[in-house]
Image (cartoon, rainbow, N blue to C red):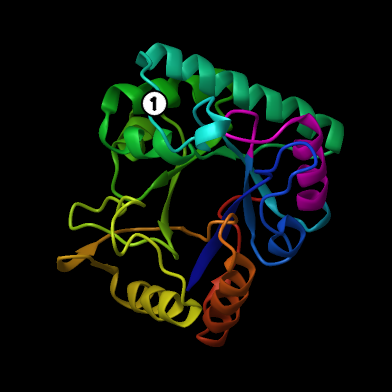
Amino acid sequence: MRIDLNSDLGEGYGPWAMGDDAAMLGLVTSANVACGGHASDPETMYQTLRLAAQNGVTIGAHPGYNDPLGFGRRVIPMAPAEVGRMVAAQIGSLQAVAALAGTRVAYVKPHGALANLAADDRGVSDAIATAVKAISPDLALLAISGTELEHAARAAGIAVYSEIFADRGYLPSGRLVPRSQPGAMIHDPAAATARLLSFLESGLMPVVGGDPIALAAQSICVHGDNPGAVEMARHIRNQLNAASVTIAAFLPA
């Protein structure tokens, strides 16, 4: 059995750092790097990309709403075409800095409120897929498992990979429990790992208030902005390896 381990990184700004990116980049196999929307700046991007390249980690662009005060977790009313242009600008920014850092961007994963909206809104997911394909047909999309973004990517002829979340609760609909509600976050590494191992064996994800649901995934996300992110990522990696699960990127670096 084989699966990727990813994390949202490069989410600091100026002298302010979010999480321990250096430690996470020694554990994950793919990194979703913020590209100036919800977080980051050119120097933060550059340093994160350099660390990722040194660790052989596959790099993805992590575009979100231009809302650093809300950390991209608030929906900003925009027409789908505007969302596409916003996403394209952020991907292009990270690609330019990646060229300076001697590496490349292999895929795109929407962030926060944008990802949650694209999960259900086909117009928004189509706009994201169109922007990604226009930039490069070689770029893949990493999408929340069981969402409209997966369908939009396939319709556009884009390679798409699906992810589940180690540290987030699920609703019976397959969507994530909103962060404002009980059960949204999983902080215990042992509990998170036990759930992942059960999912990998059965293909069924436990949910809040319902029976487990079927999901498919090629990647597991551990959010890098959580205080216990490094401990959780390390525990998950160690325990999955002990269970003969190979941790490997879904795309080459």
Bin the neighbour count of mark 1 within 10 Å (Cα to Cα): few under 14, some 14-19, many 20 and up.
some
**Residue 63 visible, this angle:** no
- Residue 196, compared with residue 173, is above or below; it is below
Quarter assignment of residue 101:
top right
Query: Where is 194 relative to 21, above or below?
Result: below
Left or right, 197 with respect to 14, comes to: left
The question of residue 39 being in magenta is answered with: yes
Residue occupying image coordinates x 76% and y 51%: 52
Q: Main secondary structure of the magenta part?
A: helix
Q: Residue 188 at what x, y percent from top left? A: 46, 77
Percent x, y of residue 140:
52, 37
Q: Secondary structure at mark 1?
A: helix
**Percent from the top left, x then y, of residue 231?**
61, 74
Instruction: Pick whichever, 251 or 86, lies toward us.
Output: 86
* Magenta span of residues: 34-53
Q: Residue 221 at what x, y percent from top left? A: 50, 58
Q: Nearer the viewer, residue 198 or 189?
A: 189
Residue highlighted by disc 1: 156
- Identify the amino acid type marked 1: Ala
